[in-house]
Amino acid sequence: MSKQMTFTLAIAVVLSALVPGVAGYLSARLEAIEAAERNLRALEARLDLREARDARPVSFPAGCLRTPPEQQLEQAPAIALEHGKHWPSDVSAWLSGLLREVESALQKD
């Protein structure tokens, strides 16, 4: 047997294994794509049914009721919450003067 004949037979053997394998792979991929497409269409149909069933009117037949305003809580100034600072000394002048008067009145007693 010549080298050319051996090479031709080797190529024929490789192609005889390769062609059916590639054909099987491609047909399996195509079948998987078709199955995924069918599943997607089924899920879309289920979603459309669910959206149609759960549809709600945008406006309500009755008017909206006014809710009473919430009670506003008085909050302490942030400076009163800081550590290491005394709140009364940082208050405006009229209040600190009032505090001095109260302290002096308490010390007299």
Image (spheres, rainbow, N blue to C red):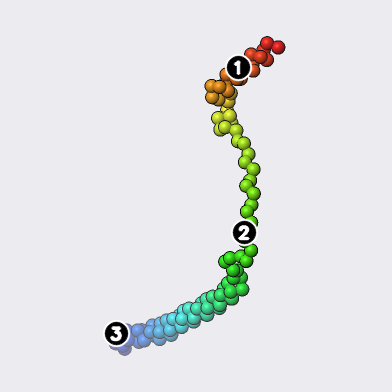
Q: CA distance from mark 3 to mark 1?
A: 117 Å
Front label number (3 vs 2) = 2
- Asked whether residue 43 appears in the rendered view, the answer is no
Query: Nearest the camera: 50 or 41?
Result: 50
Residue 33 in picture, x, y percent from top left: 48, 78
Other residues around mark 3 within 10 Å, as few (<14) / some (14–19) / many (≥20): few
Q: Which residue is mark 3?
A: 3
Q: Which residue is mark 2?
A: 64
Q: Tell me the quarter of the image containing the N terminus.
A: bottom left
Q: Quadrant of residue 17?
A: bottom left
- Which badge, 1 or 2, comes first in the chain's sequence? 2
With respect to residue 82, does 23 lie above or below? Answer: below
Other residues around mark 1 within 10 Å, as few (<14) / some (14–19) / many (≥20): few
Please tell me which residue is depicted at 55% across the width and 30% down the height of the picture.
Answer: 79
Tag 3: amino acid: Lys
Left or right? Give the position of 44 relative to 8: right
Left or right? Give the position of 18 relative to 41: left
Please tell me which residue is depicted at 57% across the width and 66% down the height of the picture.
Answer: 58
Q: Which residue is mark 1?
A: 100
Tag 2: amino acid: Cys
Q: Give the farthest residue toward the right.
A: 109
Q: CA distance from mark 1 to mark 2?
A: 54 Å
Please tell me which residue is depicted at 55% across the width and 25% down the height of the picture.
Answer: 91
> Which numbered dot is residue 87?
none
**Element under label 3?**
helix
Query: Nearest the camera: 68 or 11?
Result: 68
Front label number (1 vs 2) = 2
With respect to residue 109, does 94 lie above or below? Answer: below
- Asked whether residue 77 appears in the rendered view, the answer is yes
Q: Are marks 3 and 2 in contact (CB under 8 Å)?
A: no
